[in-house]
Amino acid sequence: MRIEIVPVFEDNYAYIVICPQTNQAAAVDPAQADPVLRRVEQLGVDLCAIWTTHHHWDHVSGHEAIVARYPSLEVLGSPNSGRIPCLTRSIGDGEQIALGSLRFRAVATPGHTLDAICYINDRVAFTGDTLFCSGCGRLFEGSAELMYQSLNDKLAVLMREDTAIYPGHEYTEKNVAFARSLTPADAELTAYGERIAALRKAEKPSVPSDWSTERRFNPFLRCQSRALAEAVGGDVGDPVAVFAEVRRRRDAY
């Protein structure tokens, strides 16, 4: 499979997923039509679908213009939303999605929003605003318990160590700085932050990450860690409460 990263707005990413056997492509969260359409035309691929991770404007604003150019597109999203423009197919939790010879699974991951979906196979995961590199989305509609379960129960079961993580935003540098504020003595985390800072200084994307890296450095996946629990004054036996406190501190960071 081929994945093209398309920067949109100030810090969003849209993605073009391409099946090399069939040349069919899907656009993930094409929030701005023009850069996505330009890249589709440059690549010469057959755009046949839009995959929507959730309804927020900075993920769906390009739908109408893209569908106007490609009227037969299949637009996928959550059946619980009613807020996704041009939706043609409501997909349920665990539903299989085909793109040429590629196969993905839709995974409902409520927390950031109640209609959040991740698109996952054994190699990659498009996580929208549910899972960022070294972070997770704000809890606009869901609860800390819902988001904790989405990340640490649902996604964790499906990920391989080398699964590539493609999130909806370029937030990694600030996320790592926040993680370092919680556990400043973590030398590996410091070194990781320096690598991310070098990438961003060179104007290169910090994505994708991978599940192994996230398990090591993402504080929202480490709420059962004694070091992290102690850092936020929490109880290692209550990881949801630790998660809630980490999220509260990140919101104020």
Image (tube, grey):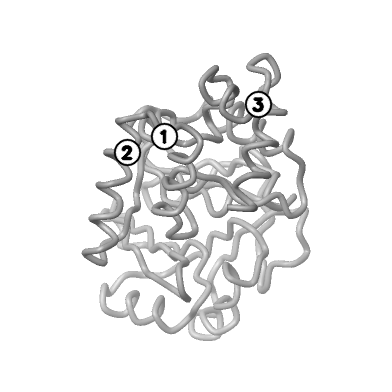
Q: Crowding at label 2, few (<14), some or many (≥20) Cα neighbours within 10 Å?
A: some
Q: Crowding at label 3, few (<14), some or many (≥20) Cα neighbours within 10 Å?
A: few
* Residue 56 image-quadrant placement: bottom right
Residue located farthest toward the top when viewing the structure as drawn = 237
Q: Pointer 1: what residue?
A: 184
Residue drawn at x 45%, y 54% is: 174
**x and y percent of residue 252 in the render?**
64, 53
Q: Nearer the viewer, residue 98 or 107?
A: 107
Label drawn at residue 48? none
Label drawn at residue 233? 3
Label drawn at residue 190? 2
Residue drawn at x 35%, y 35% is: 189
Look at the picture and state if 33 lies above or below 76. Answer: below
Q: Amino acid at mark 3?
A: Gly
Q: Nearer the viewer, residue 30 or 43?
A: 30
**x and y percent of residue 52 in the render?**
58, 60
Asked if marks 3 and 1 touch (Cβ < 8 Å), the reply is no
Residue drawn at x 50%, y 70% is: 30
* Distance (Cα) linking label 3 and label 1: 15 Å
Asked if marks 1 and 2 touch (Cβ < 8 Å), the reply is yes
Q: Amino acid at mark 2?
A: Thr
Residue drawn at x 45%, y 43% is: 134
Tell me the element at label 3.
Answer: loop
Q: Is residue 16 left or right of residue 220?
A: left
